Amino acid sequence: MKRAALLVVLLSTAPAAAADNQIRAFVGGTFGGGTTFVDLEHAAGRWNPAIGASFVTLGNVFGVDAEVADAAGFFQSGDTGLVLSSRVTTFTGNLVVAAPRSRTEYGLRPYVLGGAGLMRVGKTDYFAVFPETRLLAAIDFGAGVTGFFTNRSGVSWEIRRFEGFSGGEDAPGTTIGRPARLSYWRASMAFVYRY
């Protein structure tokens, strides 16, 4: 017990300069989605572009990640015109566990992460029968790898799973049989700037 307490104190008093602070701007896409929302164009499971940014602070092994991402056209397949506009936006905070920096300084650094946040779902259909604007609680988890070309710049590849859910019952007609849920995978590639 005393050793664990000493370890926590040593980690918390490490110099701020030892932290690896990064800004990551990414592009990618969502796929493999499923939802209880009325999905007129059956688009939730298809590939859809996504963009976003995250702010990451990593120590030798542990770190944190704060991310915002947006997937415009999430409920639109582009071939029927039943949905006029749609998007899914996520705001998440995560705990990151990475391979030790001391062992991966000149190579690829793999990591896993997991956390929680909010998911905003919005869509407008042609007939205005199933409009939706909803804020859901969300969890996410994933894995990735980062590599640097220089001391300041590099790239990162990542895959994450998002699960959004409501805490109560929904108005009739907005979901199919169950409370609001939306889940999907996202694959992305990011430009990483270290500061």
Image (cartoon, rainbow, N blue to C red):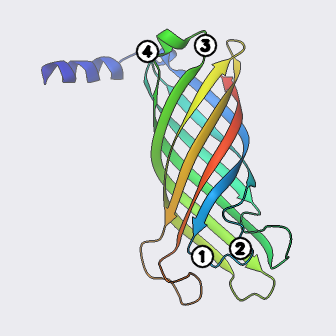
Foreground residue among 34 and 52? 34
The quarter of the displayed image where residue 90 is located: bottom right
Report the residue marked by disc 4.
Answer: 15
In primary-sequence order, the first of circles 1 and 2 is: 1
Mark-to-mark CA distance, 1 and 3: 43 Å
In front: label 4 or label 3: 3
What is the three-letter code of the residue carrying label 4?
Pro
Mark-to-mark CA distance, 4 and 3: 24 Å
- Element at label 4: loop
Q: Residue 49's x, y, as percent?
A: 76, 52
Report the residue marked by disc 3.
Answer: 107
In primary-sequence order, the first of circles 4 and 3 is: 4
Say whether marks 1 and 3 touch (CB < 8 Å).
no
Foreground residue among 155 and 187? 187
Mark-to-mark CA distance, 1 and 4: 48 Å
Report the residue marked by disc 1.
Answer: 37
Crowd rating for badge 1 (residues with CA inside 10 Å; few <14, some 14–19, many 20+): many
Which residue lies at the image location 85% right of the left edge and 76% below the top edge? Answer: 81
